Amino acid sequence: MNFAKQLAKEPLLGTFVKTPHPHIIEVLQYCDLDFLILDAEHSPFDRTSLDLCLMVSNIPTLVRIPDSQPSTILNSLDCGATGILVPHVCSATQAETIVAKCHFGAGGRGYAGSTRAAQYTQKLMQEHLSDSANQTTVVVQIEDIEGVDNVSDIAAVNGVDALFIGQVDLAVAYGESSVNGESVRDASLKIIEVAKSYDKPVGMFVSDAKQIAHWRKLGVSFFGLASEHKMIIDGFKNQRTQVESND
């Protein structure tokens, strides 16, 4: 399955996963989501917890990696991630290096046939090489002023499959008090238009599904909706409100 091609089929709905345990992945399989993003940047995922979570996931699963070091990329992909979401991508050179480290070949990802991605030695080398080349999904997150300035060069990099708008960090970078600030909106619209010009899908985080219709009309095709932590909190608070409203 080529998840990168699916990203352009709007709208795809996923969520950020903050709990580094396979049980939450098991539960999320019943939530009618199109994909998951394991948030290894801002949550306490290590190699073992990533491995366990990817082991039980049966829907496309990206890993938002904490850095773009080769070992970090290799760990996620060897464990069977559909692809990676890379934060704070600011230049074409950085994007080119990331793409190279996601794929096998000279200067790229080290090969091992004993991983989950290689079906524990059961997948022939040529098949594994082909699957990796065709199916590994590379999403770069634009969330810095430098990244916005260079977004056209970044989007032009062969092997960058999609762009992801990081509005929260953009708000911080531009000195806005929220993601609704004018600078954040202008930057978001620029990223969307550049993505369109290179025929690449663009995604973003939204805290509430009510925001999706607006951004979908503007060209965003996949959405990371909140997180399981936020859904748990909101769910029980909403239930509490209903109980108290009936008193």
Image (cartoon, helix red, strand yellow):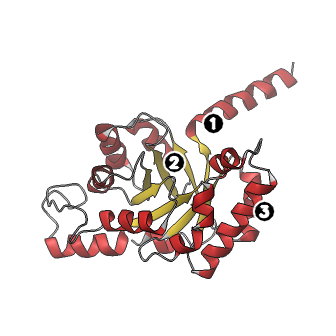
Q: Dot 2, crowdedness within 10 Å: few (<14), some or many (≥20)? A: few
Sequence-first disc among 3 and 1: 3
Choose between 180 and 216: the one closer to the eye. Answer: 180
Q: Identify residue for label 3.
A: 214
Amino acid found under the numbered disc labelled 1: Lys
Residue 110 place in picture, x, y as percent: 19, 61
Residue at image coords 38%, 53%: 68
Q: Secondary structure at mark 2?
A: loop
Measure the alpha-carbon separation of dots 3 and 2: 27 Å
Q: Earlier in the sequence, mark 1 or mark 2?
A: 2
The outermost residue toward the top is: 247
| Amino acid type at mark 3 | His
**Which residue is label 2 attached to?**
30
Q: At label 2, which amino acid type do we have?
A: Tyr
- Foreground disc of the pair 3, 2: 3
The quadrant of the image that shows the C terminus is top right
Q: Is residue 216 left or right of residue 68?
A: right
Q: Secondary structure at mark 3?
A: helix
Point out the image quarter for the N terminus.
Answer: bottom left
SS class, disc 1: helix
As rendered, which of 42 and 239 lies closer to the eye? 42
Residue 36 left/right relative to 227: left
The residue under label 1 is 230
Tell me residue 131's x, y (percent): 28, 72
Measuring from the top left, give residue 192's x and y in whole percent.
67, 69
